[in-house]
Amino acid sequence: MTKEQAHELAVKIAKVLDDKKGRDIVIIDISAKSVLADYFVIASGRSTTAVKSLCDNVEEKLSEEGIEPARRDGMNETKWIVMDYGSVILHVFHEETREYYHLERLWVDGANCERYGE
């Protein structure tokens, strides 16, 4: 997957999250800092039910296009769910868990972050 295709996938994921009332959605370009992926998409849900629902919706919409996550983690706990789409890694947090870990602080340098849905 090219970086442009990865960005398109990140935006597609962000749109699904926004359509389903995901909160504080950001797309972070991590390509200069990591070989894990090109982008993180980070969002919050107000409750553990919302977190799981957001991830279920992303998985359903992308599956319709033949795009499946390589790995998922946190689906049972639902305070922080990670879905690995190769060049794009999705993190959906319960709001309190996101505040605690503040993942953006570790990866954002100002120029590599775009807010979605604001």
Image (cartoon, grey):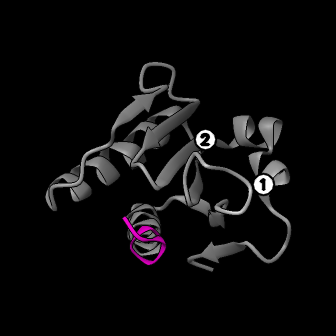
Mark 1 and mark 2: Cα distance apart in space = 16 Å
Residue marked by disc 1: 107
The amino acid marked with disc number 2 is: Phe
Highlighted magenta segment, given as a residue range: 1-6
> Depth check: 3 or 106 in front?
3
Q: Is residue 5 magenta?
A: yes
Residue marked by disc 2: 93
Left or right of residue 30: residue 87: left
Left or right of residue 95: residue 50: left
How packed mark 1 is, by other alpha carbons closer than 10 Å (few <14, some 14-19, many 20 or more), is some
Q: Position of residue 6 (x, y in %)?
A: 44, 67
Identify the mark nearer the N-term, 1 or 2. Answer: 2
The residue sitting at 71% across, 63% down in the picture is 32
Q: Position of residue 83 (x, y in %)?
A: 44, 41
The residue sitting at 75% across, 46% down in the picture is 103
**Residue 40 figure quarter:** bottom right
